[in-house]
Image: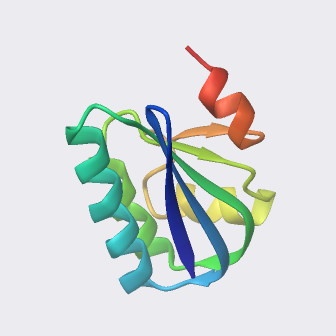
Amino acid sequence: MYEARNQDEVTVIRCVGELTRDELSAIAGLAQRARHEGRMVVVDLKRVTHLHYAGAALLKAIPGLRAAGASRYVRDLVHAGGAGGYVELYGDVEEAVRAA
């Protein structure tokens, strides 16, 4: 499950629980549109317990995408999906927004 909120020039996508491939596809589409509008995008993974690693691969196509708060397990799944070198990972949403 996820929800997106626009805050100034930032779109924060807050995710909860297990993210399916379909949900990650929808998140990637939302993030892509926001990036095309010139918005910073942060995907908050703090409350994510599992994600479909092949769905995580969809995130690597979005330049400048930031993710925050992921557990070690969720980070490993992002890397296993091939997005680890493309998605900027931060400790929390505030850190991701402040990063230059």
x and y percent of residue 66 in the render? Answer: 52, 40
Which residue does the image show at 20% across and 40% down from the upper left? 36
Instruction: Report which quarter residue 45 is drawn in.
Output: bottom right
Quarter that holds the N terminus: bottom right
From the viewer's perspective, is residue 3 above or below residue 52? above
x and y percent of residue 51 in the render? Answer: 58, 76
x and y percent of residue 86 in the render? Answer: 42, 40
Which residue does the image show at 44% across and 32% down from the upper left? 9
Count of numbered marks: 0
Its colouring scheme is rainbow
**Left or right position of 72 against 9:** right
Which residue does the image show at 61% across and 29% down from the upper left? 97
From the viewer's perspective, is residue 54 above or below residue 77? below
**Left or right position of 44 against 3:** right
Instruction: Report which quarter residue 78 is drawn in.
Output: bottom right
Instruction: Report which quarter residue 76 is drawn in.
Output: bottom right
Quarter that holds the C terminus: top right
Residue ranking furthest to the top: 100
Residue nearest the observer in this picture, 1 or 69: 1
Which residue does the image show at 51% across and 56% down from the upper left? 5
Residue nearest the observer in this picture, 42 or 64: 42
**Left or right position of 11 against 95:** left
Residue ranking furthest to the front: 8
x and y percent of residue 83 in the render? Answer: 44, 52
